[in-house]
Image (cartoon, grey):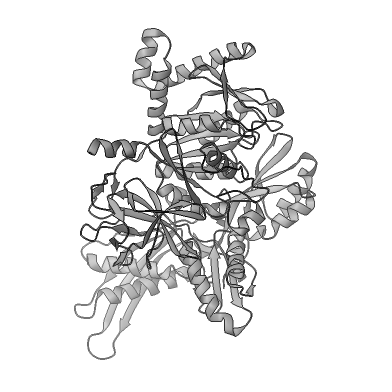
Amino acid sequence: MRNNLDRQLSAVRNLGILAHVDAGKTTVTERILYATGTTHKRGEVHDGTTVTDFDPQERDRGITIFAAAVSCEWAGHRINLIDTPGHVDFADEVERSLRVLDGAVAVFDAVAGVEPQSESVWRQADRHGVPRIAFVNKMDRVGADLDTAVASIRDRLHPVPLVVHLPIGAEDGFTGVVDLLRMRALTWSDDGGAAVEGDVPEDLLAEALRRRRLLEEAVAERHPAALEEFCDRETLSAGTLAAALRDLTRTGDGVVVLCGSAYRNRGVEPLLDAVVAYLPSPLDVPPVRGVSGGEERTADPSAPFAALAFKVAATATGRLTCLRVYSGTIEKGDAVWDSGAGRTERIGRILRVQADRHAGLERAVAGDIVAVVGLKSARAGSTLSAPDAPVVLEPPGVAEPVVSVAVEARTGSDTDRLAVALARLAEEDPSLVVRTDPETGQTVLSGMGELHLEVAVEKIRRSLGLDVQVGRPRVTYRETVGRGVSGVVFRHVKQDGGAGQFAHVVLDIEPLGADEAGEGAGAGFVFRSTVVGGRVPHEYVRAVEAGCRDALAEGPLGGPQVTGLRVTLTDGATHVKDSSETAFRTAGRLGLREALRACAMVLLEPVVEVAVTVPEDAVGGVLGDLAARRGRVTDSAVRGGSAVVTATVPLAELFGYATRLRSRTQGRGTFSARPTGYAPSPTPTPATTR
């Protein structure tokens, strides 16, 4: 029985499709569904007929906005696949998906190579330890070059690329690949049929043998068993090479690279074979650990149930919660413990997800990715477990919002409906934050970028028919210490009958160094105490630190949060009766506020790295426009006949940039951006933060 369960789990692959915008993720997903027989017609992004881009906004804009899960079968294996967004504004969707995946396919444009968001999602996968294989797509485009794309992967992402394909033909003449493991040619016709296997073309045989040799040497350098065989026979068998590639992929010591053209249906079957051969099953990944106590849960259907909710969606048929089941088995009607809400809930239905279509299941077992209906309180990041064996798994990280807009209903009668809609949005997407400005009374919606907020507001308008007014986006500023002060004395004395409050503290404030601050100017806060002789007891030192952290919520320049400083408690005094933790916390808060007013403060603004792709004849105008937006150009290159300009630009200067860029380049220019931290702002007081 146990062996049968292990065989079933070993035939499961949970993977994501990762890439930059327009690298072809959704088309790759669509062709996988077609090749596996899940769909019988190839959908196209430009026609709005793809399975995973089912939301009306995705079809209108031609980009993936929401991570969508689908399931298919290939060579006796079940593949649970998540098509993730490629736009930086929706990076949080990628983060939540990677948290529950065992492997990934990174898709790269054969002309552009590694693009800014390709790099971002690759780093996200690194953080989660997700093994990857690479698929160089669009080999049929003008300027496509596999070697150049592989070089950019090596130089910018720093993996060891293990190329297993040699293209047959170039650009529009790309017809197939040489499989370097089996030394066989795979070609496809224009009718989109299955691959035809044959001998390696004579004119490519010498080059194929040379590349096979390079692949063997690269693998032997990194795999002990392969090295032993290579030393004995001076070559590697296909079986040894495949086993070594699987091991190197799963340990992250190498990345298998394939190529093809998903749009023309070329290279999809070898990609599926590589997914089955090299990416891990649920049995191959380490057990998950609980955040408290370190309890491990293995992929065992007979173990206590444990699952992580990674996506919540409101549908016409009810609230849908997507789960990755890590251990145990769940059936319809079972009760589960929601650790986030601290309550027991009951599973109404279990569904196999096919984007916006679903098929009912009787049960879900360890290793499955499914959706359930009936949970009322579960949020993205909630752990669901057996009531008699509770566990809390580490939730996905949530990025801090950087752009805000004020939203309000045009009519007072719609105010309550808008509040409900915003609460539902924040429930479905944890990277959206809704709050009320205590000074203006405005409802403020914060997110990861201008497009992120635009999509959220449009969703309210379309789903509920609400007429919503939106103010200009506002960015989140920070304050930091430019020049500190020493020996700031603060005495907190309060006596109003009965026991009083007394706390005496002496503080030094200084900016953090670059090695302590981490990414971006002014990141972080460090507190330390140099008090000796017990003049301030240890529990009061902790209270002073807590008070200092309270004071960081608002800075003296204009109210933004303060960061990037070190506070040192150098001396203090107590009263035998009137001192308490409350008194010292108050002294820490008020003392630091007073000290900050004496410091030279610096306003920080969020900055982003922008990659602008334009025709070469438009570079001059683009550079001038970036300079006018206080941009600092860091790199420029020519790729496939287009110029790519990379610059660091304040986020506040990018509002409306897409429209401006299109007008300067007759609609031919595109750009992408990713947050890089904070930098000093020339603005003395941030009017947009209040």
Write the residue at 36% across / 8% down.
232
Q: Residue furthest bottom?
A: 497
Q: Is residue 445 above or below residue 3?
A: below
Q: Is residue 2 above or below residue 195?
A: below
Q: Position of residue 556 (x, y in %)?
A: 51, 71
Q: Is residue 381 left or right of residue 540?
A: right
- The answer to whether one can see residue 361 in this image is yes
Write the residue at 48% across / 19% down.
181
Q: Position of residue 484 (x, y in %)?
A: 46, 61
- The answer to whether one can see residue 536 in this image is no
Q: Is residue 101 above or below residue 389?
A: above
In the image, 119 versus 541, the foreground residue is 119
| Quadrant of the image containing the C terminus | bottom right
| Quadrant of the image containing the N terminus | top left
**Res 497 → quadrant:** bottom left
Q: Position of residue 679 (x, y in %)?
A: 56, 55
Circle count:
0
Write the residue at 59% across / 65% down.
459
Q: Position of residue 419 (x, y in %)?
A: 52, 76
